[in-house]
Image (cartoon, grey):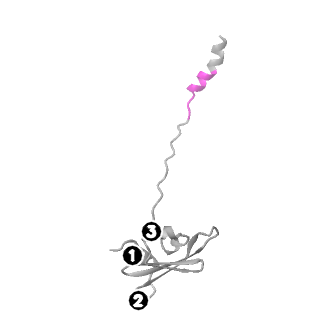
Amino acid sequence: MRRLVIALPLLLSACLARPAVEPQVAQPVPTTRPGAGQLIGFTTSDLVAHFGSPALQVREGTSLKLQFRGKLCVLDAYLYPAQNSMLRVTYVDTRTKTGADTDQAACISALENPS
């Protein structure tokens, strides 16, 4: 009888309705193409992974300029040491092959889709 008295609350608690717990599903991270402002903070590896090998690398002191060339434009990314001494993009400049200023987003798109 004692065992029944001890087991009864356990059996009753098992029968109580429990709220259904929905499993957590990881949301996909949207992939967006970076605009010029979004290139700020990129590392050298990030730029190479995104645009391929640079056409030109210029090292001056602790800074680095990487140049990427396409059919329509030229993109210069200027990297300087961050707090952890890793080089990161702090400024981006784009121009046409003749040297005229061009829209940065259009240039980045042209470099991403070289057709």
Can residue 76 be seen in this snapshot? yes
Q: Mark 2: which secondary structure? A: loop
Residue stretch in magenta: 9-18
- Percent across and percent down for residue 16 are 57, 28
Q: CA distance from mark 2 to mark 3?
A: 24 Å
Q: Is residue 1 magenta?
A: no
Alpha-carbon distance for marks 1 and 2? Answer: 16 Å
Secondary structure under the numbered disc 3 in the rendered image? helix
What residue is shown with label 1?
A: 110
Say what secondary structure mark 1 lies in.
Answer: helix
Residue 52 rendering spot, x and y as whole percentages? 42, 71
| Mark closer to the chain start, 1 or 3 | 3
Q: Is residue 15 magenta?
A: yes
Write the residue at 37% across / 81% down. 72
* Amino acid at circle 1: Ala
Q: Which mark is residue 50?
A: 3
The residue wearing badge 2 is: 98
